Image (tube, grey):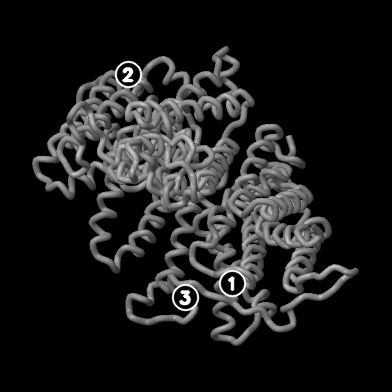
């Protein structure tokens, strides 16, 4: 086990070093793109935590991503020049003016019913805080209802799926408040002190890369704590964990919330990098796509899921440069997905682990240390779940 | 009001046809088939293609679509789903991949578009199917004006639901399906050829979805992505109705279809779908097994 962890952290170190060194070889355009994919990598981490370690297939991760994105985007929208050029010293989002009833006060408080909820977002830090608080709050309430009622397996997937589609429709329907289908565009840059994070700059890239590194290592440490081990025990046999006297729902809620918080955080970073927030973040296909990334990378490996997300998106970006291949690539993703589920159920990460185990087992034969080999292969079996 | 209820009933009919297949495959085989919506889409495209190439109207397209989608369903079961029995969530993911493949196959005209060959009726664009004159317009029944095409949908669905019920309750293969729904291992131990029955069930369910697609093509635009919302809706019907319960699916399709059309009449379509999702979440939380579940212990 100890040596397995050593290998793991070596790999994590290599990955973190790679994303930190990458800017030396890339121009601004690619930095911005890669920053986006790193954000997707963070979503991979969130999926691996809830699906791989907790056994909860959340088909509504997009809800938390969208919540984080919208919260920050609301603040950045108010800070944007387009919101200030409306003949008033107080910012008002441009789309509200377009749709305002004649004679309405062009003030955030009362330009339309409900526009007052935008008031606190005049502070950028309120938006940043809400970007974590809102996903955590939604996840806590959902988690309490779902896991205290002992709802499990596919029913959790259906509830989360219905929830994300429900919220998506509400956001689209609340057009005066959210700009409906069009989402929030023309956003300002995030400002810390006097420094502005230009999405096409090294600074923004490093912010995303460092955030991803912290989340990645944090998640890896979290799953090897006692709580993480209990969670895996629950995933493998919920009833047994219950009979051992563990408060199973508490652990499930905790990891569900952590995963949601990571998604919310990723949503905020994505808004910074891509300068928009839209209801497509809450499309069913986006939430399932996240699961695809994690499955290809390896659901039971946090790093694997993260790398899977980044790799798939990088290949997609390369392929999409040729126009004729855009649609073909989608078909290839579908095919890869079918093949991975059929032949590599633990994804590329699991495949790599197996190779590593085999290689180490062979080395261990040279040094006659049978006990170690047996213990480790048992460990590998356990992880396969 | 009666008007709204009638529109709701025709929505329910489409939902039911989609859900029947899912109810059987999920109930009997423990497979979540995300490619089921693509069967609806393929059915609709069969209607488009048979109009263009065979000069066949919607009514004649129904049996063709049933055969085509049933065969596609059979192939999916044989090649992919068969290897995944007992891995519920994996079936969801693998069939999602299949769904993307089928969508892209239509969009790229089975790859022919690369060679510059264009098949009329395929490709990424929107398609339309005209309703035959006999099914257009309205007629009066007991003083109420009724849309003929919607009535046609309801009649076809009722007939197909009755046929499904008879197949399940009155034939030996139906009895085997019911045995598998109750307890697959015990059924296998009693000599039921589970693999064969599952393949046939899967094909039959896909065929029903194909018919739903043909009927949808009469009042909705046909395009490659049209299946995804259908599989979600169909699945919600199954879960609300209770896994493995045909009656449950019928009633919950009726319930959800009516809620949809009533709320849509009062507010708008977007809110109507949102209300549906809300109702479904509530029902799952309160009764996770669905309103009617006959699954064995």
Q: Residues within 10 Å of mark 2 (few under 14, many from 20)?
A: few
Q: Which residue is mark 3?
A: B122
Image position of A378 (left or right of A139):
left
Q: Residue reaching furthest left?
A: A24
Residue A248 pos. (x, y %): 55, 19
- Seen at 47% across and 19% down, the residue is A230
- Tell me the mark number nearer the camera, choosing from 1 and 3: 3
> Same chain for the residues at labels 2 and 3, yes or no?
no
User: Circle 2 is placed at which residue position?
Assistant: A371
Q: Which mark is residue B68?
A: 1
Inter-mark Cα distance, 1 to 3 = 16 Å
Q: Is residue B283 left or right of residue A3?
A: right
Where B226 sits versus B129, above or below? above
Q: Residue at x 70, y 32 (%)?
A: B286
Q: Position of residue B257 (x, y in %)?
A: 71, 54
Tell me if A282 is positioned left or right of B116 in this view.
right
């Amino acid at each position: 086990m100890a040596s397995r962890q050593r290998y793991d952290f070596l790999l994590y170190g290599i990955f973190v070093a790679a994303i930190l060194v990458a800017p030396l070889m890339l121009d601004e355009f690619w930095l911005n793109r890669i920053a986006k994919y790193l954000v997707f990598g963070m979503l991979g981490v969130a999926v691996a935590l809830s699906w791989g370690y907790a056994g909860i297939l959340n088909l509504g991760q997009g809800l938390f991503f969208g919540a984080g994105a919208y919260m920050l985007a609301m603040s950045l929208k108010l800070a944007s020049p387009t919101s200030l050029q409306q003949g008033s010293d107080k910012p008002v989002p441009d789309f509200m003016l377009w749709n305002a009833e004649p004679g309405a006060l062009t003030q955030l408080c009362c330009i339309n019913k409900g526009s007052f909820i935008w008031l606190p977002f005049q502070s950028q830090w309120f938006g940043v805080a809400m970007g974590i608080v809102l996903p955590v709050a939604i996840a806590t309430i959902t988690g309490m209802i779902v896991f205290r009622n002992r709802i499990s397996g596919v029913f959790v997937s259906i509830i989360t799926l219905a929830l994300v589609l429900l919220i998506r429709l509400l956001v689209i329907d609340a057009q005066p408040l959210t700009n409906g289908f069009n989402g929030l565009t023309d956003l300002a840059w995030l400002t810390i002190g006097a420094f502005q994070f230009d999405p096409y700059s090294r600074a923004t890239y490093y912010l995303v890369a460092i955030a991803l590194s912290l989340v990645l290592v944090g998640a890896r440490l979290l799953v090897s704590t006692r709580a993480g081990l209990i969670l895996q025990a629950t995933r493998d046999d919920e009833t047994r964990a219950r009979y051992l006297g563990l408060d199973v729902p508490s652990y499930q809620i905790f990891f569900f919330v952590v995963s949601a918080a990571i998604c919310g955080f990723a949503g905020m970073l994505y808004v910074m990098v891509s300068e928009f927030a839209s209801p497509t973040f809450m499309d069913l296909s986006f939430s399932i796509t996240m699961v695809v990334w994690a499955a290809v990378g390896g659901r039971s490996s946090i790093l694997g899921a993260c790398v899977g997300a980044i790799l798939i998106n990088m290949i997609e970006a390369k392929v999409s440069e040729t126009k004729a291949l855009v649609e073909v690539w989608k078909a290839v993703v579908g095919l890869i997905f079918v093949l991975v589920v059929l032949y590599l159920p633990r994804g590329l990460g699991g495949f790599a682990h197996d190779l590593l185990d085999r290689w180490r087992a062979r080395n261990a034969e040279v040094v006659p240390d049978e006990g170690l080999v047996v213990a480790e292969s048992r460990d590998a079996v356990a992880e396969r779940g | 009001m009666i008007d709204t209820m009638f529109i709701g009933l025709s929505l329910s009919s489409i939902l039911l046809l989609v859900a029947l297949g899912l109810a059987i495959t999920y109930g009997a085989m423990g497979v979540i088939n995300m490619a089921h919506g693509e069967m609806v889409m393929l059915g609709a495209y069969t209607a488009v293609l048979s109009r263009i190439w065979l000069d066949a109207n919607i009514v004649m397209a129904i049996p063709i679509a049933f055969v085509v989608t049933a065969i596609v369903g059979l192939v999916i079961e044989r090649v992919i789903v068969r290897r995944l029995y007992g891995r519920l969530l994996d079936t969801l993911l693998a069939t999602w991949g299949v769904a993307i493949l089928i969508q892209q196959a239509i969009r790229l005209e089975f790859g022919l578009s690369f060679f510059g060959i264009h098949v009329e009726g395929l490709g990424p664009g929107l398609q339309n199917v005209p309703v035959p004159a006999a099914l257009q317009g309205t007629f009066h029944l007991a003083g109420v004006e009724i849309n003929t095409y919607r009535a046609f949908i309801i009649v076809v669905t009722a007939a197909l639901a009755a046929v499904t019920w008879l197949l399940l309750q009155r034939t030996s293969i139906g009895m085997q399906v019911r045995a598998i729904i109750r307890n697959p291992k015990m059924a296998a131990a009693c000599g039921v050829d589970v693999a064969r029955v599952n393949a046939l069930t899967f094909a039959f369910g896909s065929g029903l979805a194909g018919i739903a697609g043909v009927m949808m093509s009469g009042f909705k635009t046909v395009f490659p992505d049209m299946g995804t919302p259908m599989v979600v809706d169909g699945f919600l019907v199954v879960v609300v109705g209770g896994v493995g319960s045909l009656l449950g699916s019928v009633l919950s399709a009726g319930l959800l279809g009516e809620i949809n059309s009533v709320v849509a009449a009062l507010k708008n379509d977007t809110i109507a779908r949102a209300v549906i999702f809300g109702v479904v979440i509530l029902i799952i939380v309160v009764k996770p097994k669905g309103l009617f579940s006959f699954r064995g212990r």
